[in-house]
Image: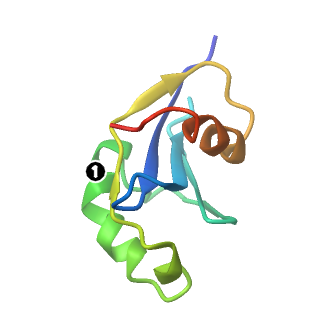
Amino acid sequence: MSRYRYRYLRTMYDKIVGVAVELPSGELIMQVGREMIEFGAGAPKLEMLNLYVEKIADKPKFKALQIYDVSRIYTTQNFRSCQQLMDEGKNFLVE
């Protein structure tokens, strides 16, 4: 069974506004708001995403989301879509 790792992008009030998912192949995909972003070979590692969150938050198209930080890393074997992970994340308090 494939294992997917992910981190939520959230506001200072713990509202989930995005998710970054590391696929079993090592590729990284993100959904920020309603926009999907797929990274190529030079993708940042999921562990290092906290170093890029300010750069993402400062982009004009994402400023309104008020991204503040990222959650810890979670894992799942039941990945269907980034939106599904975001919806599920809204049902529990993110650390």
Tag 1: residue type?
Met
**What is the image's colouring?**
rainbow
Vertical placement of residue 76 versus 52, above or below: above
Which image quadrant: the C terminus? top left
Dividing the picture into quadrants, the one containing residue 66 is bottom left
Q: Nearer the viewer, residue 88 or 29?
A: 88
| Residue 4: image location, x then y, percent | 55, 28
* Residue ranking furthest to the right: 80
* Residue ranking furthest to the left: 51
Vertical placement of residue 90 versus 16, above or below: above
Could you tell me how many numbered marks the image carries?
1
Q: Is residue 89 left or right of residue 34?
A: left
Vertical placement of residue 69 versus 45, above or below: below
Q: Residue at x 41, y 72 (%)?
A: 56
Q: Residue at x 56, y 29 (%)?
A: 24
Q: Residue at x 40, y 75 (%)?
A: 57
Q: Is residue 31 left or right of residue 51?
A: right
| Residue 87: image location, x then y, percent | 66, 42
Dividing the picture into quadrants, the one containing residue 7 is top left
| Residue 17: image location, x then y, percent | 54, 59
Which image quadrant: the N terminus? top right
Q: Residue at label 1?
A: 48
* Residue ranking furthest to the bottom: 60
Badge 1: few (under 14), some or many (20 or more) residues near its Cα, within 10 Å? few
Q: Nearer the viewer, residue 13 or 44?
A: 13
Dividing the picture into quadrants, the one containing residue 54 is bottom left
| Residue 2: image location, x then y, percent | 61, 18
Q: Nearer the viewer, residue 92 or 21?
A: 92
Element type at mark 1: helix
